[in-house]
Amino acid sequence: MDIIQDPVFYLVALPAVMAIGLSKGGFAGVGTMATPLLALYAPPLQAAAILLPIVIIQDIISIWAYRRDWDPWNLKILLPGAALGVGLAWGIAAHVSDDAIRIAVGLIGLGFVLNVWFGRTPKEMRKPNPVAGVFWGALSGFTSTLSQGGGPPFQVFILPQKLPKLRLVGTTTIYFAVVNALKVLPYFALGHFTGEALGTSTVLLPLAVVTNFLGIWLVSRTPTHLFYKISYVLIFLISIALLWQGGSHLWARA
């Protein structure tokens, strides 16, 4: 079985896989940093292709763990948009700058968190707009395909609803499981599923599964208000990291 042999790769791959495991266990924001970490070594689409088989196995575990806790209305709204976003990303993948995508996702996440922290809080929760749900789902599917950065657009729509913790985690789990399944065909078509990539995914899988169960355990023991605070902080930090990575690469080429 061919695998990547360079030890430098594993210096970034191991924390990336641990981040995905915690993410699939319920701390969704953590996983957003995985592809940017791996992209320090490989191009973002190649990095995403190495991670995708691992993510799909983790999706199966997480769906079983949260199978009783999910919100059907949100999935009906978000998933059609996500399918459109994945298809669009597939069509233009060869023509879009990875760094531009990083910057766009970072700005979305940063603006969202700053508005939560410093904007006006409505006295009553408003019912989500279905059109907005399709839009944010499409943007999430698009950025997830190109950079595994689908978390911030999804969370812009879902977090303000203040769903019960387990329903939020279950909805997030099922949503991204479907999105990841949709990405398999584009990645095959783009030629990123090489023997070396799949072999490397297999080697990293045991660590991913262990941290997946660790994430499930942590979510079950984290109070709801603290869970939301952690989610917002993670989105903020990840957004800053994406802006720094994308901006520094563009600046270096200028």
Image (tube, rainbow, N blue to C red):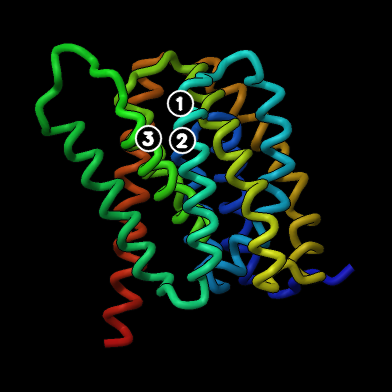
Query: In which quadrant of the rendered view does residue 236 lie?
Result: top left
Type of amino acid at the residue the image marks with label 1: Asn
Residue 230 visible: no
Where does the C terminus fall, quadrant-wise?
Answer: bottom left
Q: Are marks 1 and 2 in contact (CB under 8 Å)?
A: yes
Residue 8, given in percent of the width and then of the height, sits at 62, 71
Residue 245 visible: yes
- Residue 78's disc number: 2
| Relative to 202, residue 111 above or below | above
- Callout 2: few (<14), some (14-19), or many (20+) C-alpha neighbours within 10 Å? many
Residue depicted at x 37% and y 40%: 234
- Residue 74's disc number: 1
The CA distance from mark 1 to mark 2 is: 6 Å
User: Horizontally, is 98 left or right of 182 in the view?
Assistant: left
Residue matched to label 3:
133
User: Horizontally, is 154 left or right of 122 in the view?
Assistant: right
Q: Are marks 2 and 3 in contact (CB under 8 Å)?
A: yes
| Relative to 228, residue 46 above or below | below
Query: In which quadrant of the rendered view does residue 114 lie?
Result: top left
